[in-house]
Image (spheres, rainbow, N blue to C red):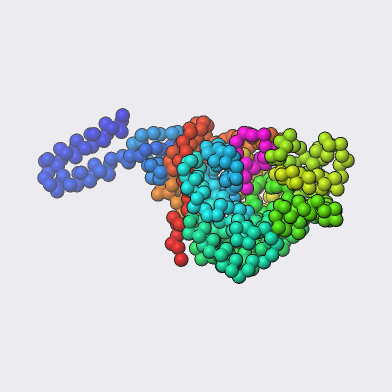
Amino acid sequence: MKRTINTVFSLTLAASLAACSGENQQASTTEAADRQAPASYELVLRGGMLYSGSDQPPVIGDIAINGQIIAAVGNLGDYQAAQVIDVQGLAVMPGFIDIHSHALSDNTEQGIFGWPDAENLIRQGVTTVVGGNDGSSPVPLADSFEQIAAIPPAINFASFIGHGSIRGLIVGEDDRPATEEELILMQEQVALGMQQGAFGLSSGLIYTPGRFADTEEVIALARVAGEYGGMYISHMREEGLGLLDSVAETIRIGEEGGLPTQLTHHKVVGAPMWGSSVETLRMVDEAIARGVDVSIDQYPYTASSTNLQILFPGWSLDGGREALLARMADPTQRQRLRNDIVYNIEVDRGGNDPANVVLAGCPHDETLNGLNLSQVLLREGQEITKANAAELLMDLVAAGNCSAVFHAMVEEDIHNIMRHPRTMIASDGGVEGPSNRAVHPRNYGTFARFLGHYARDLDIVPMHTAIHKVTAMPAQRLKISDRGVLHPGTVADIAVLDLESVRELTSFSDPHQYAEGAVHVFVHGQAVLLDGSMTGARPGVIIRSTDYRSDP
């Protein structure tokens, strides 16, 4: 009320002076009144600790929002606002950008289609996810973009174009080089993906059919993405014994392909390699020093998650599932396959113990979800040996395959990678909701764990650096210029957190638990989380690289 009275008094005084002093005086006093008139905003977040996203300590201030855009940042002084939210004592920051997400699912009852509110992500402060990782994406992208936009979701969605999906479409599941004609067709598909809005090329060189491509093929496709201003992001061929060669290959693809390159969910798997992050990070630094644009993303857990075939040797996967089943049915080849799986249990994701492999989702038998291989063997009356575990793995894959969680990493490497200035944090998870699947906790806790456990409690990185790693840093990597920072004129994707209470509640034994600490979350200026409660608003959009660049 006081602001309204003062404004009326100023305007009345200006009119009176103009009447006495003529036209010139009227102009000058009207200008004075204009200067004194308070700014008008739709929403003001007042008195918060503002983390801009730019790796600087916070300052106390206000955020004003008009429509979808941040209108003003700082000490706003005198203003009018339709809505004011007091955020004193809370941290205000850009909404988080999950640069490695699997928000899409082949099962429309799961992922972003099954849970369009994306509560598991919103409650951590995530406002944008980037799919199409590990070499797997819809081809073409345009159709899936339309389907997602039609939902619509609560979060924004962006995507890479997947090398493995393209290779599967053009070459198939065979272990052979692409022909010259096939390579041209794959390049055309990469170009189409970039024209439809992809932010770059992803690869999954540990998975079929991506693992059957040589480095030159990937360079040739990455070069096309680079011509459109895109980046290359790779699930490398090996993260265990072959880790160093895989890091070198990823750097080479960026260097020779002429585009930014990224080691995605960088980790060190298997006891023989623990501590090797010192060497991999040295390789990254040396590449940067000679001008290669290398970056990293990481999830903050000592366990990975993927399907059971990660423990199968590449030769066994040549030709696809039917060929694999035929090999398992042949006694000689089955023995060879069993020996190779035992080896991978010992030195790779098996962590040298069948108990380290925990079944997360077995569609053919949901009673297996949450059991490790040792527990399943005991349930079936078998002795716990690595050979028996290998036989069990083959039977599970033959029955329909399962996803699993693999405990085979150590905190030392997590800390080393996390501290590196080129490392971002990403979930490698997706959009999840309550189910009987024993999913990896990263789906519910990645960002809360990073901020609460690693930044606040362990001080592995300062809080403002931690926030930079999940906001401005991924935005800059993707060349998304209007998100990831709290600047006037940028999109109002904003998270308001109580940093003292941020924590993950999820666990490996009870994963479907939402994180704590998020108070308000805004997407395009609309509250999707308000006072700790989901609002039901779903203002998410498709973010396309074409909105930020000119095609070649």
Residue 210 occupies quadrant? bottom right
448 vs 128, left or right, is right
Name the residue located 17 percent from the left edge and 47 percent from the top edge: 27
* Residue lying at the far top of the rendered structure: 1
The dominant secondary structure in magenta is loop
Whole-percent x and y of residue 317? 73, 56
Name the residue located 64 percent from the left edge and 66 percent from the top edge: 178
Instruction: Count how many numbered circles sit on residues in the image.
Output: 0
3 vs 125, left or right, is left
Name the residue located 45 percent from the left edge and 60 percent from the top edge: 549
Residue 156 visible to the viewer: no
Q: Is residue 16 magenta?
A: no
372 vs 205, left or right, is right
Whole-percent x and y of residue 356? 78, 44
Whole-percent x and y of residue 169? 60, 58
Name the residue located 57 percent from the left edge and 35 percent from the top edge: 517
529 vs 6, left or right, is right
* Residue lying at the far right of the rendered structure: 383
Q: Is residue 440 magenta?
A: yes
Whole-percent x and y of residue 90? 51, 37
Residue 21, above or below 245: above
Residue 277 occupies quadrant? bottom right
- Which of 81 and 238 lies nearest the eye of the viewer? 238
Q: Which residues are magenta?
A: 427-443
Residue 391 visible to the viewer: yes
Tell me the quadrant of the picture where the N terminus can be found. Answer: top left
- Which of 281 and 68 lies nearest the eye of the viewer? 68
